[in-house]
Amino acid sequence: MDFAQNFPAVSILLCLFAGIISSGLKKKAARFVSMTLIIVVSFLSLWTLFYTIRTGQAFVYVMGKFPAPWGNEIRAGVLEAFMALFFCIIMLLSLEGGRKKLADEVEEGKTFLYYVLSDLLLSSLLALVYTNDLFTAYVFVEINTIAACGLIMIRQNGRTIKASARYMIMSLLGSGLFLMGLCMLYDLTGHLLMSNIKEQAALIYSSGEYRIPLLIVIALMSVGLAIKSALFPFHAWLPDAYGYSTVSSAAILSSLVSKGYIFLLIKIIYRVIGFDIFNSSKIINILFVFGLMGMIFGSLSAIRENDVRRMISFSSVAQIGYIYMGIGMGTQAGIAASMFHILSHAATKSLLFIAAIGLTDVSGGSRKFIELTGAAYRNKWAGAAFTVGSLSMVGVPMFSGFISKLLFAQAAVQNNVKMLPALIVLGISTILNAIYFMKTVIRIYTPPDNGKYESITFKDMRSYTIILIFFILLNVILGVSSQPVVDLIGQGLAMFS
């Protein structure tokens, strides 16, 4: 076995151990451990990515060297390694971008817990990306849920406690449905490893004997993960969870947590149930309809908001709808478009949340639109960053959102049945996106009537501004150099099968 094949397992274990170590450290030491960990895991993920590209195939790492059905496996290909690397980059930028505000948002004695939770969250995301065992995936789904709930609740006020309670209730409902589907699937196939389940599922489907139970399994798992990723109409917990948590938590939750669940669903489609069986189940049509509805109703809710943080949160409902629309098309092109949008949305939505806090800080701490008048003049870098994120969400060329919408349109024309509704809703959603994002950009660039708020410069918030620049560059790179990323996604999806 090549040495690089150890890296996925080592990455997950490092994150778990870092969480344990950070629990006994003070704030600065816990932050140092977490940041160092993310950099190390990013390097390991990059090495794994280069290794899988060079070999041209995925590899399986057997935990404990016990074969199936007793052993546990990690499977890494191009797509898994790339997603792990991207998740680490977004996590690093999000934590650093909200670091200055963390002292104001979290009690002094609890700051170290924030880094413990972020370590556990990263470990769960990496496990969801790499695991080849369905029950292990469920275990880390629960770790992800607890860590995410803690990141919401650690900012102690009434709104965050209420938001975390709603998040936990809905998330546990999704976890319960997923576990029920997992138990039924284990009863049908007798396996927990994804590759073994896929072989048995193909036999069950071809025999026709247990097609109804298999259909129920697909429905339970799909709905469970849809609830956890806030697909419309299961999104009621999302606006408060994103809108009132710390700025780093909002960036991490919107960019990474829901995407980990969606990535797991895509793995189940390809490596557990089988792409053809999943398409024939017609569950995919339900996901398509809910995705279209999310694109419209999420945007309408965002238009009605007068709070910039909640507006960005409702926008996430619409963007998750885009991803499920692509999955619901039932084509390789649709899945590829959804995968790219996961990257685009992660890079853009974290940018918007981080930029928004810079605008509200120079507006007396108010998040109301009327108070944000002229905020881009008082914090020029935050204004520029928010504008870039807004243009990306609308789908303006040169930014990542444009490539996402182009890929969705190309995928739609390959499906004669779903082409018309997909293109119509894509156009309507783009118009709605322009309404609420451009309204905000116009507001922050409207000259204020008075200068009652002080301006800040690059020197005042050097590290924060550097993070914004990195986010802007990441968004532009995805927008102007998208083809290598699209090729990696295509290569990774081919390895999934």
Image (cartoon, rainbow, N blue to C red):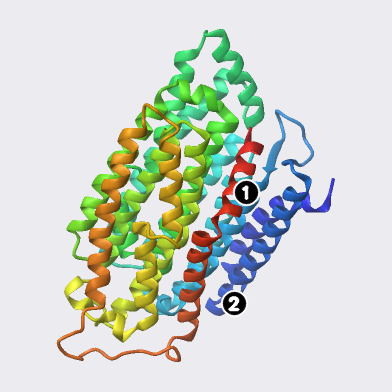
Based on the displayed image, in which of its 4 quarters is residue 275 positioned? top right
Q: Farthest residue toward the left?
A: 449
For disc 2, the neighbor class at 10 Å (few under 14, some 14 to 19, many from 20) is some
Q: Is residue 433 left or right of residue 88?
A: left
Q: Which residue: 44% across, 73% down?
A: 98
> Is residue 295 placed above or below 242 in the rendered structure?
above
The percent position of residue 476, horizontal first and vertical second, equals 49, 65
Based on the displayed image, in which of its 4 quarters is residue 15 positioned? bottom right
Can you see residue 264?
A: yes
- Which kind of residue does numbered mark 2 sit on? Ala
> Is residue 310 placed above or below 497 in the rendered structure?
below
For disc 1, the neighbor class at 10 Å (few under 14, some 14 to 19, many from 20) is some
- Which kind of residue does numbered mark 1 sit on? Leu
Q: Quadrant of the N terminus?
A: top right
Q: Which mark is residue 189?
A: none
Q: 399 or 75, which is in the foreground?
A: 399
Q: 82 or 19, which is in the foreground?
A: 82
Task: Name the residue that disc number 2 marks.
Answer: 29
Q: Which residue: 37% across, 66% down?
A: 352
Q: Which residue: 42% across, 90% down?
A: 460
Secondary structure under tag 2 reads: helix
The percent position of residue 451, horizontal first and vertical second, equals 20, 91
Task: Name the residue that disc number 1 marks.
Answer: 488
Can you see residue 113?
A: no
Going from N to C along the chain, the mark reached first, 1 or 2, is 2
Based on the displayed image, in which of its 4 quarters is residue 187 positioned? top right
Spatial CA span between label 1 and label 2: 37 Å
Q: Quadrant of the C terminus?
A: top right
> Is residue 44 placed above or below 225 in the rendered structure?
below
Secondary structure under tag 1 reads: helix
The percent position of residue 307, horizontal first and vertical second, equals 22, 66
Query: Of circles 1 and 2, which is in front?
Result: 1
